[in-house]
Amino acid sequence: MRLAKDNDGNPVFLAPNKPVLQVAQERSPKVGFHAVREHGHRLAQG
């Protein structure tokens, strides 16, 4: 698995390359993928 948590405890998907990211996005349409975010802002988990 390529999952981790950032410094704020938010889940992170570590894609090794763009094609892997694209496949993950296609297979998980309900998951929000973001390229970057501001440090120190916890994302809402639902």
Image (cartoon, rainbow, N blue to C red):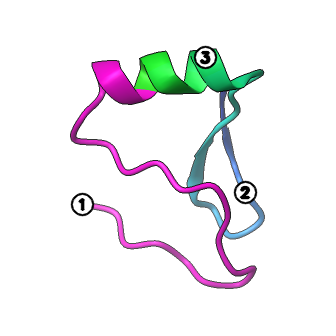
Secondary structure type for disc 2: loop
Q: Residue 15 at x, y = what percent?
A: 68, 27
Query: Would you name the residue on which mark 1 appears?
Result: 46
Q: Quadrant of residue 16?
A: top right
Residue under the point 22% across and 41% down = 30
Depth-wise, is mark 3 or mark 1 nearer the camera?
A: 3
Q: Is residue 11 above or below residue 43?
A: above
Q: Is residue 20 visible?
A: yes
Depth check, front residue: 17 or 32 = 17
Amino acid tagged 3: Pro
Q: Is residue 36 above or below residue 23?
A: below
Residue 32, magenta (yes or no): yes
Residue under the point 37% across and 51% down = 32
Query: Would you name the residue on which mark 2 appears?
Result: 6
Disc on the earlier residue, 1 or 2: 2
Task: Specify start and end residues of the magenta stretch as a single range.
Answer: 25-46
Secondary structure type for disc 3: helix
Q: Residue 23 at x, y = what percent?
A: 45, 16
Amino acid tagged 1: Gly
Q: Residue 7 at x, y = what percent?
A: 77, 65
Amino acid tagged 2: Asp
Rounded to the nearest angstrom, the CA distance separating label 3 from label 1 is 27 Å
Disc on the earlier residue, 3 or 1: 3
Query: Would you name the residue on which mark 3 appears?
Result: 19
Q: Quadrant of residue 27?
A: top left
Q: Residue 28 at x, y = what percent?
A: 30, 28
Q: Main secondary structure of the magenta part?
A: loop
Rounded to the nearest angstrom, the CA distance separating label 1 from label 2 is 17 Å
Query: Given contact means CB atoms under 8 Å apart, are the residues at marks 3 and 2 in contact?
Result: no
Disc on the earlier residue, 3 or 2: 2
